[in-house]
Amino acid sequence: MSGVDIKKADKLISDLTPLITSTHNNSVLKNIGGFSSIFDIKKLGYADPLILSTTDGVGTKLQLAIKTKNFFNIGIDLVAMCVNDIIAQGGTPHFFMDYIATGKLKINITSEIIKGIVKGCKLANCALVGGETAEMPGHYNEENLDLAGFCIGAAERNEIFNINDVKENNIIIAIESSGFHSNGFSLLRKIIEDKSINLYNKAPFNKNKSLEEILLKPTNIYCKLFESLKTKVKINGITHITGGGLIDNPPRSFSDKLSIKLDMKSYEIDPMFHWIKEIGNLSWKELLNTFNCGVGLLVYLDQDDVERAMQQISNVGYKGWIIGEVIIKKNKKVNFMGL
């Protein structure tokens, strides 16, 4: 029989409803079972709000999750990829929705993913207000699935980041990543396959953890850091380092009249990135254009705000360091020093 098991899907959502609603606040109207979710933004106290929206997936990191049957962390990744883009524009994420498509609904797998999404939403202080679980036999095989996330945030009109807010001589603070995050996995998977590397063995660059554990570590969610930091200093801009790495992402945060200098000797690049560079025979440009190289965010600040910002970053529990500065435009938008 090749039909869609609607009763199974309904039971899954019913069983998870208490967990899902634990992410809600009084801005989420009770509407489970409705055709859309309803959110009362007026209750959040904005005076002149603008709405921000993002949508994203987790790329082929999902294939590693399927292969290793490790699905919880990928739910956190799904939230992180969306909410971090919201804060990179100056907004606060408020509600999240997910889309899970599969050939055959497997309760244990889908439940783990949704539990991870709930965890991510709690880390982001964001309500999981709905979603779609699609069973599509004939389109996906029974072992395959896909994920997409969608997030809505808001900010006061005068708090949205503008590329013209980043100025010459601004200092750039890097915020640590948790590892590869959710980008570069097509290349990672190809190298692992070509070199016949066992995911379950201890990582060549870390004898305390398996390669599977390191690769599937979830993307950092920076919402708490952002909300805390903006109360102490004026943030001129934020770059979320995703696909395109440290080459393609930073220019999205400042005007064409500017460039940046990044000092790659300002921190110790994690051995995992050196390992993938060596084993994949990658140039520095290829590495920097594919992976975050240990940098999850770049934060652009006036010089006078740097000391307070560094203290606050530490208070929230993150590692941050001065990685560079904003300069008048040179030939390249991003200039790497110390490589």
Image (tube, rainbow, N blue to C red):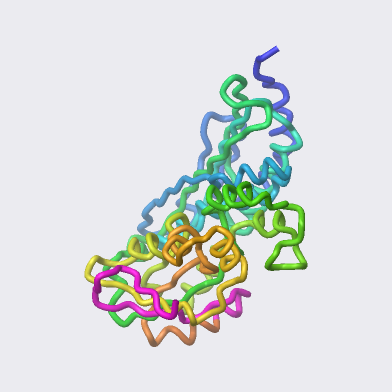
Q: What range of the chain is rendered magenta? A: 312-339
Where does the image place residue 304, in percent across and percent down from the top left? 39, 87
Where does the image place residue 255, in percent across and percent down from the top left? 26, 66
Q: Point out the image quarter for the N terminus.
A: top right
Q: Nearer the viewer, residue 218 or 154?
A: 218
The residue depicted at 72 percent of the width and 39 percent of the height is: 111
Q: Point out the image quarter for the C terminus.
A: bottom left
Work out whether residue 32 can be spotted: yes
The residue depicted at 49 percent of the width and 82 percent of the height is: 266
Label count reads 0
Is residue 265 on the magenta stretch?
no
Where does the image place residue 20, in percent across and percent down from the top left? 67, 44
Residue 268 located left or right of residue 5: left
Residue 138 located left or right of residue 334: right
Q: Nearer the viewer, residue 286 or 78?
A: 286
Residue 224 located left or right of residue 66: left
Where does the image place residue 2, in percent across and percent down from the top left? 66, 14
Residue found farthest to the left: 257
The residue depicted at 70 percent of the width and 64 percent of the height is: 204
Work out whether residue 26 can be spotted: no
Residue 275 found in image quarter: bottom right
Is residue 328 on the magenta stretch?
yes
The residue depicted at 30 percent of the width and 71 percent of the height is: 165
Q: Is residue 297 above or below residue 32?
A: below
Q: Is residue 131 above or below residue 27?
A: above
